[in-house]
Image (tube, rainbow, N blue to C red):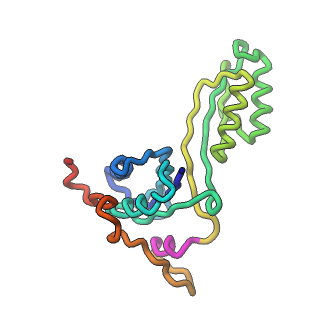
Amino acid sequence: MLHTFVALVQDRPGVLTRVASLFRRLNINIVSLTVGESEQADTSRMTIVCDAHEHAAHRIRASLYKLETTVHVDEVNRSEAVVRELCLIKVAAGPNAPHGLHSRSQIFELAQVFRARVVDLAPESIMLEMTGSASKIEGLVQVLRETGYEILEISRTGRMAMRRGHHTTRVLKALGTKAPGEADEVELDVEAASEDDKLPSEFEGDDA
C-alpha cells in the first residue's frame, strides 16, 4: 500500500541522508521523494511516498518525529489533498521518426487531449511538459508507446501533495498559531513508540 507523508524539516546538512537512512532501517521502500522550500524560513517541505503495510503509518510517523530536524509530519491521501506530479517527455519527431513528417502534428494533437504543453521543439524531437496525477501521466506515456512513437527520455518529479482547505490545528501549531475557538489536537506521543520504532535523533555519533 502506498502512503504519502508531507514533512517539514529544518534546513541542515545531512537531513536528506537521515530520512533515507530511516526508511532503510525500517526496511520500507521509498517510491518517490521531493524536496523544496516551504513557506517557513530555513525549513523545507518533503513529500515522501513509500510502499508499506496498511498499518505502518503510525510507526513511520513516530520514527520521523524522532529526527531532531523534523518540525511536523502529516499523512495525506487523495481524498483530502491535492496531489500532482510534473513530467517531461522527449519524443522522437522528424523525417526519420516512425510516423515521418506527420509525427509532429499528431503529437501536438495528443498534447491537447492530455493537456500537456510543448516546451521544446528540435529538428528530431519534441519535448512535452505535463502536470497532473500519476495515472494521467502514465496514460499519455502508454498512448505514445502503443501508437508507435519512440520516447527518447522521461523525467518525473514524483508526487507533491498539499492538504485541501484550512490548516489542521496541528499544522497551525507548527506554524506558531492557533485556530480560534478550536482545541489543540492530541499530539503524537513519540515517547510511547516501541523500541523498534525509535531511531537516533542526534547528528553526531552516526558511525554505526
**In this image, 161 relative to 207: left or right?**
right
**In this image, 100 relative to 204: left or right?**
right
Q: Position of residue 88 (x, y in %)?
A: 61, 36
Q: What residue is at 76 percent from the left and 17 percent from the top?
A: 99
Q: What residue is at 22 percent from the left and 51 percent from the top?
A: 206
Q: Position of residue 5 (x, y in %)?
A: 50, 57
Taking the image as drawn, is residue 67 in sight? no
Q: What residue is at 45 percent from the left and 75 percent from the top?
A: 176
The secondary structure that dominates the magenta segment is helix
**In this image, 99 relative to 124: left or right?**
right
Q: Position of residue 166 (x, y in %)?
A: 61, 71
The residue closer to the viewer here, 30 or 122, is 30
The quarter holding residue 153 reads top right
**In this image, 207 relative to 48: left or right?**
left
For the magenta stretch, what is the residue range? 167-175
Callout count: 0
Above or below for 168 versus 133: below
Above or below for 146 versus 60: above
Q: Position of residue 171 (x, y in %)?
A: 50, 70
Furthest residue in direction top, as rendered: 96
Is residue 174 magenta-colored? yes
Q: What residue is at 56 percent from the left and 39 percent from the top?
A: 156
Taking the image as drawn, is residue 143 in sight? yes
Furthest residue in direction bottom, as rendered: 181
The residue closer to the viewer here, 194 or 31, is 194
Is residue 25 magenta-colored? no
